[in-house]
Image: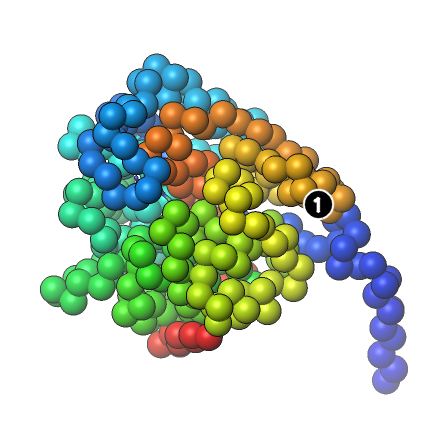
């Protein structure tokens, strides 16, 4: 029997549309900003003397939700708890993965700061009502912190940042609870306290990466993992440009520095820029406001019985 292969074109990796779209990113949970305030300071962007404008925040959030719907995504909305001013940042509620038998499981966050811990108490029943089983990284007094804004499906693995919020010990829980391989990367930059401020998968081969968010070993390992990285300077990342979501070939971004735009357009992406300035007062933007519910084990992530953690 003869096997025929076709030689890839020399520019395959950098030509437009050359790689497969992300298999997830068409279904999100979002928390309606009914009680969004800056009541305390847990990241360098927050200042209790600079409060978000309630009306403007609501309009910006509505525009984001409408934009996602317009791109064909589904959005499930949770109301915000009055005692949880940061709950709008839905990405931090937990990490959901649909197992290969179709059963969805979410690992709920165990927030670093007590000011946010009550949020998962509302998110868990919201998911349970929709058929999700849940586990909790901080269970049984083990207390490892995990915030899902640090976790991404990329390639066949779960990519997780740890340091400012998620603790290294949490990576073991994630790997075991989800039966996946977890690749950990140590974050050292105080302004990029969640991985979603410094990393953003664009498709199956490409991702935005800001190396200055990580220690040297982790930055090198992450650049090694991403076949075609869009490398961001510290200054570019601090515009929140990596805190974007990708729906098919459209990147919905709060900001897009010129060099980033050039590269995305050369790769064939459509760019939609939205104003999320009120939410930047809380230290988060588009990715933080949206939590994907369509990550699949078996298609997006490899099944690794018992899980495995790989550190640089
Ligand atoms: N004020 C929130 C915090 O510090 C912002 C969360 C931003 N979310 C994110 N996924 N990066 O926890």
Res 122 quadrant in image:
top left
Report the residue that reaches farthest toward the top: 55
Figure quadrant of residue 102: bottom left
* Left or right: 194 in relation to 237: left
Left or right, 139 with reference to 224: left
Q: Is any part of residue 80 visible from this angle?
A: no
Q: 116 or 301, which is in the foreground?
A: 116
Percent position (x, y) of residue 209? 55, 55
Nearest the camera: 307 or 284? 284
Residue that numbered label 1 is attached to = 263
Locate residue 127 relative to residue 241 in the image: left or right. Answer: left
Q: Which residue is drawn at 25% across and 43% down?
A: 42
- Return the x and y of residue 301 as percentages of the image width and height: 50, 64
Tell me the SS state at disc 1. Answer: helix
- The residue lying at 51 percent from left, 33 percent from top is 254
CA neighbours of label 1 inside 10 A, class few (<14), some (14 to 19), many (20+): few
Is residue 213 visible in this depiction of the protein? Answer: yes
Tell me the quadrant of ligand 1.
top left
Q: Position of residue 164 (x, y in %)?
A: 31, 56
Q: In which quarter of the image is the N terminus?
A: bottom right
Is 193 located above or below residue 170 in the figure?
Answer: above
Up-down relation of residue 251 to residue 113 (above or below): above
Residue lying at the far left of the rendered structure? 141
Left or right: residue 308 versus residue 224 is left
Q: Give the residue furthest to the bottom.
A: 1
């Amino acid at each position: 029997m003869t096997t025929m292969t076709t030689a890839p074109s020399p520019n395959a990796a950098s030509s437009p549309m050359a790689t497969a779209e992300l298999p997830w990113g068409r279904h999100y949970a979002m928390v309606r900003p009914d009680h969004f305030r800056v009541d305390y300071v847990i990241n360098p962007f927050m200042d209790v003397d600079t409060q978000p404008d309630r009306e403007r925040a609501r309009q910006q959030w509505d525009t984001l939700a409408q934009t996602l719907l317009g791109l064909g995504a589904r959005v499930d909305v949770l109301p915000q708890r009055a005692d949880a001013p940061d709950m709008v940042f839905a990405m931090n509620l937990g990490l959901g993965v649909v197992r290969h038998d179709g059963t969805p499981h979410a690992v709920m966050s165990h927030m670093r700061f007590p000011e946010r811990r009550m949020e998962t108490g509302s998110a868990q029943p919201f998911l349970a009502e929709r058929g999700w089983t849940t586990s909790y990284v901080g269970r049984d007094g083990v207390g490892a912190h995990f915030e899902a804004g640090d976790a991404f499906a990329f390639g066949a693995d779960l990519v997780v940042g740890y340091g400012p919020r998620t603790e290294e010990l949490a990576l073991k829980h994630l790997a075991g609870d989800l039966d996946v391989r977890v690749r950990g990367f140590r974050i050292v930059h105080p302004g990029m306290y969640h991985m979603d401020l410094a990393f953003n998968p664009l498709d199956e081969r490409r991702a935005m990466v800001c190396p200055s968010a990580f220690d040297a070993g982790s930055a090198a390992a992450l650049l090694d993992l991403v076949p075609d990285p869009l490398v961001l300077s510290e200054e570019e990342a601090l515009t929140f440009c990596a805190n974007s979501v990708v729906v098919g070939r459209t990147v919905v971004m709060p900001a897009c520095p010129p060099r980033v735009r050039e590269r995305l357009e050369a790769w064939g992406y459509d760019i939609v820029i939205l104003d999320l300035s009120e939410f930047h007062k809380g230290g988060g933007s588009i990715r933080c406001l949206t939590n994907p519910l369509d990550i699949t084990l078996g298609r997006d992530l490899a099944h690794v019985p018992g899980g495995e953690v790989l550190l640089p």
